[in-house]
Image (tube, helix red, strand yellow):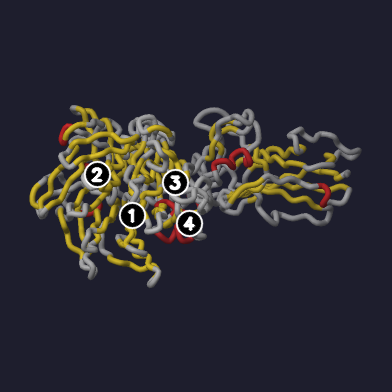
Amino acid sequence: IAVKGDEIYFSDGNSGNIHRLSPATGLTVYAGGFDTPSGIAFDKNGGLLVADSGSNTVKRIDRSGVVTIVAGIAGSRGNADGEAATATFNAPIGVAVSDDGRIFVADTYNDRIRMIENGVVKTLAGSVKGFADGLAGSAMFDTPLGIAVWQDSKLLVADSGNRRLRVVELDGRVTTLAGDGSYGLRDGTLGAASFVQPTAVALDLSGSIFITDGNAIRAIGLRPFAVVETISGGSRGFRNSVPSAALFNRPSGIAIGSQGQLYITDSDNALVREIGGIKDDFQETTSGTEEPPRFTSSEFRAIASGRWPYEPQDRPREIAGTLGEIRGKIVDASSEVWFHNGLDIPGAYGETVRFIRNEKVLHPAAVENFETSRELLRMPTIGYIHIRLGREASGTPFDDERFLFETVGTRIIDIRIPRGTKFAAGDAIGTLNAMNHVHLIAGRSGAEMNAIDALTLPGITDTIAPIIEDVKLYDENWDELETKSADGRIIINGKTRVVVRAFDRKDGNPERRRLAPYKLSFMIFRPGEETDRPGEWNISFERMPAHDAVKFTYAVGSRSGATGETIFNFIASNIVNGEGHREAFIDPSTLENGGYTLRAFAADFFGNIASKDIRIEVNK
């Protein structure tokens, strides 16, 4: 993102466009035809420099809109210095321009900082991936992203993989300005503070430094003494509010407006955000009221036809886990539990896993957890977990240059897949690791959808209704209601919770397999008012609920994981879905005294509905 006067310019890596937001013309495409554009910066003549990651080039848009290559060879990856027309880059992401016209490039996957001056490309600093301060080639970076000119003769670099903010002087000397290399959002003195993944950096006229980091906005220079502080965000999400309460989802670009406001590209929310006048008033609210754009299920299905992640891609497979299932075990309020956010599709150890749709990498660090059971690749709309990426079961790498392996001798120690790398449906991702299943995520990070609904997997069927094992009632303090009337009805005389123990099954699954139902609810009715489905579903897993909704969804005793018994105790009286969650009860003050039937419901995606009745008596 870059600002010129009252106009905001930002790159869209997915569409290949540079957009302009102007008070006069609104939002327009300023220039198109790029291959995953990333960082942008204006030169003194009004030209806009673009780090075009997917083409491995640096380009310039002149004031009339003509696009030319400044340096690099389109489609050619390398790290050669020399004449601009023959020099090569490796998916550069950051670009900055000094007042004298020199262009500085964060050559991300070469782990180098490059300079373009008078038509010649020179490596200022960096060598192999790693961490080291020092001079020129003795210094090391790890996936440098954002870059900005600082104090006229220095550069600030967001060294994402090292979780540090680095300084590069024009003689190539590299030092660390902030960050101790540990993971986290720890504020404090420059050497003691920690970062998650610094991605972009910008400076205001007074020299204060602003950094996008993970899901947060950090700053240096707002105090009389040098400290790193978090001024906004922290947890993933979306919320417009005062800076301390606002939420972001992978902010990746930052620029300073003429009035000191911060403009931020909130990438996984697909929004441009503003923090107004942060230097003058920490209570200024983030502006704008737009909600993050989200796919509907039908829109998501329309992107590509459904495929399974194995060969043949039209053959149905077993389903071992669905979105919304609890992971971990609830013993008490302190239990560490979370929602399962995808679809588990079993396969054989070492089986080749394949892409299910055409996509290109947008996240600069799309690969995570190398050589662990949770090794993963996050594409823009689909995530793939539990895969040995780019490698056979033996560990032998695929003959595929899209996978960048880091080696020590013959041993592979890490892997990266550059931003802008394209894959087609059916291409091999890798092979199944010891988890023996693909954890498939549908939807953008932070906006995950139920993959059974969003993907229309070929041949998938389900004619088996869920099973409701038990229905229990509890008072507001979680004491079970067991007192019964003379005719055996459970007596309700105060706020009451409904807990439904249920699970789902699916055609083709082993009998032992227990999945979470798609929706749950209950109804209360008098004799003669019977219904075969509720008016509203209280719990819905159409979309991923918020993380802190887990204990609004599941009661004590719930558990699920790789081993052991699976128990789903749903708090069916609460309201939980992808839009929000809240505690709710049966309120007897809304009912007349007398006998009723409480009918619990559990439904799967395919329309099969199970129900179970208990008799209750309202006696206020």
Give SS at disc 1: loop
Q: In this view, does 118 lie above or below 169?
A: below
Horizontal side of residue 557 vs 356, given as left or right: right
At a point 27% along the width and 56% down the height, the residue shown is: 41
Amino acid carrying label 1: it is: Asn
**Residue position for label 3:** 441
Q: Distance between the residues labelled 2 and 4?
A: 33 Å
| Label 4 or label 1, whichever comes before in sequence order | 4
- Report crowding for label 2: few under 14, some 14 to 19, many 20 or more residues within 10 A (C-alpha): many
* Badge number at residue 358: 1
Task: Mark 4: give few (<14), some (14-19) or many (20+) Cα within 10 Å.
Answer: some
Percent position of residue 127, x then y: 18, 36
Quadrant (top left/top right/bottom left/bottom right) for the C terminus: top right
Q: Position of residue 54 (x, y in %)?
A: 25, 53
Determine whether 534 is above or below 373 in the image: below
User: Which element type, helix, strand or loop, lies under badge 4?
Assistant: loop
Q: Residue 155 carries which label?
A: 2
CA separation in Å, label 3 and label 1: 15 Å
